Image (tube, helix red, strand yellow):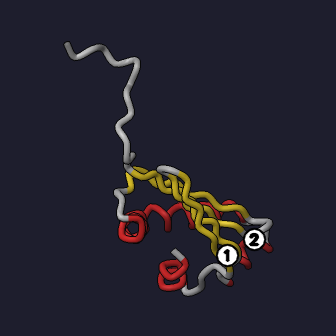
Amino acid sequence: MVQLHKEFYGKGPTKAKTYLNGDLIVVLMRGGFTRVEETLLQEGRGDSVIQQRADFQNVMLGRFKEVVEEESGRKVVAMMSGSHQHPDLLGEMFVLEPTDILVDEAAPDSE
């Protein structure tokens, strides 16, 4: 994740940590606002930074999923992103295809 941010933003997070719990991977990154984003934030345009980061996540969705699938060996079925400005945090959440079959109790019997 950090490498993709560095490659496509020109600057990446200063710290990153990945959490894995069952079918969920969360990548929490700290730092990494670009000079443009910092300028927008200083001028009270945080909404523009949030929108830009959301647009970037949508464009990069395929690449992010590829990295997680390659590293985890499992298929990503959903990805969600969020950013926070003070402190500078970026979160990427990936939901993996379940490894066990879940039974839908509300589903009618197939008999």
Q: Which mark is residue 92?
A: none
State the image quarter where residue 74 is shown: bottom left
Asked whether the beta carbons under mark 2 and mark 1 sit within 8 Å of each other, the answer is yes
Q: In this rendering, would 99 be left or right of 41?
A: left
Q: Which element type, helix, strand or loop, lies under badge 2?
A: helix
* Residue drawn 47% across the image and 50% down it: 23
Q: Could you tell me which quadrant the C terminus lies in?
A: top left
Query: Between residues 107 and 10, which one lies in front from this camera angle?
Result: 107
Q: Amino acid at mark 1?
A: Glu
Classify residue 85 by image quadrant: bottom right
Tell me if 94 is positioned left or right of 82 in this view: left
Label 2 environment density (alpha carbons within 10 Å; few <14, some 14–19, many ≥20): some
Instruction: Give left or right: position of 20 versus 45.
Output: left
Label 1 belongs to which residue?
A: 37
Task: Tell me the residue that label 2 is attached to.
Answer: 41
Give the CA separation, mark 2 to mark 1.
6 Å
Give how far across and how far down residue 48 sits, in percent. Answer: 64, 64
Relative depth, front residue between 56 and 109: 109
Residue 27 in picture, x, y percent from top left = 58, 65
Q: Is residue 33 above or below residue 28?
A: below
Disc 1 is placed on an element classified as: helix
Q: Decide which of 2, 69 is in the foreground and name it.
A: 69
Residue occupying the point 68% across, 84% down: 35
Which residue appears farthest toward the left when viewing the image?
Answer: 111
User: What's the residue at 73%, 70% (across, down)?
Assistant: 88
Q: Position of residue 91 (x, y in %)?
A: 61, 62
Q: Residue at x 38, y 25 (%)?
A: 104
Horizontal and vertical percent position of residue 10 = 55, 87
